[in-house]
Image: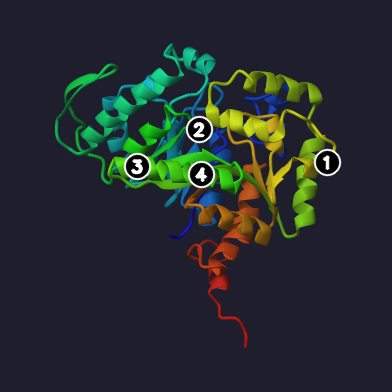
Amino acid sequence: MPITTHWFLPTHGDGRSVVDRPHTTPTGADTPRRPDIDYLAQVAQAVEHLGFTGMLTPTGSWCQDAWITTSALLARTKRIKFLVAFRPGSLSPTLAAQLAATYQKVSEGRLLLNIVTGGESIEQQRYGDWLDHDERYARTDEFLAVLRGIFAGEPFDFDGEHYSVRGATSFEAPEPAPPLYFGGSSDAALPVAARRADVHLTWGEPPAAVGRKVQRLRELAAEEGRELRFGLRAHVITRDTSADAWGTAQRFLEQMDPADVAASQAKIAKTEAVGQRKIAELHGGVLPSSARDLEVHPGLWAGVGLLRGGAGTALVGSHAEVADLIEEYHAVGIEEFVLSGYPHLEEAYWFGEGVHPELARRGLRAATGPAAARDLTPAPH
């Protein structure tokens, strides 16, 4: 299957380094690029121009609302899809179905949905959600059962522990029904993905670990009579040469304040999310002097996770080397890549103009974006 690439919409702000993150450390509070609609439109238009399929838009108290922000960007873009993240505990499944149907109507089918169950009780409690980790996944399971029932287009009845609905319906079924992207690595999360998701998203662990997770999920999905697609969420630092890419990673590392790293790791140590703990194990909370000391697999750098939660690894190297690593992930079952970089505008160009053509040359994706015409020109004999 061909590879699908998505980018990230920085609705929390943007900057030239991993330290410019307003939701992780005090250093990032004054992020250089505020997430005003004009800057976000620049990023979205660039990503569309470069041939990406969609844009993940995050959810949480540290960023703007994904539904409203991406709706505003529909008029500033033509083709790009928006992978809208939201938390099932913050709205009813019937309202979510109505939002999805309206969005598909207005956007002419440009909605993808990212279901974020929530791995942190502190964050959940900001929204008035007091369920524990496993209970949240049980609720998500019911939420998605109702959501899919409404998507079918007929009044839907459901009785569960968390939701009971009668005749649940939307003014019309979304056309098309948006694919459901879902993350989670715990024993509570994986069966929900197998039953309900279209695409399971995982953090950027080394390919062998990702492959083991993919295999387990394939087995669970087969038991449900279903098949899943699989996606990877990671950062990227790609340049014309490997030395330039690793030089950027080294600059990011040198800008990190040890006190900020310690504070970030203290927060992450309390996480309930299994996938987050696995990312933290890759770097061990240690701030080395050399970026290469955090290379946990050829071309996979764990340094981002020293400061930020969520996606904590980056694909680092020349365009060909990053394509090599993407091929490794593809070989173990990953078909979709949700990527980001610092700054999101410039790094999208590095990847779109450098790695996209390389993947096209290898037959892993169609040639798209500004380099398409050049890539399709026959080589001289």
> Marks 4 and 2, how far apart in space?
27 Å
Answer with mark 2 or mark 1, whichever residue precedes in sequence: 2
Q: Amino acid at mark 2?
A: Pro
Instruction: Return the mark for residue 58.
Output: 2
Q: Nearer the viewer, mark 3 or mark 1?
A: 3
Label 4, secondary structure: give it: helix
Question: In this figure, which residue is indicated by the disc labeled 4?
Answer: 212
Percent coordinates x, y for residue 262 in the rendering = 75, 21
Answer with mark 3 or mark 1, whichever residue precedes in sequence: 3
Question: In this figure, which residue is indicated by the disc labeled 3?
Answer: 221
Determine which quarter of the picture holds residue 239: bottom right
Q: Amino acid at mark 3?
A: Ala
Q: Residues within 10 Å of mark 2 (few under 14, many from 20)?
A: many
> Marks 3 and 2, how far apart in space?
26 Å
Give the residue displayed 65% in from the left and 29% down from the top: 308
Question: In this figure, which residue is indicated by the disc labeled 1?
Answer: 290
Q: Amino acid at mark 4?
A: Arg
Label 2, secondary structure: give it: loop
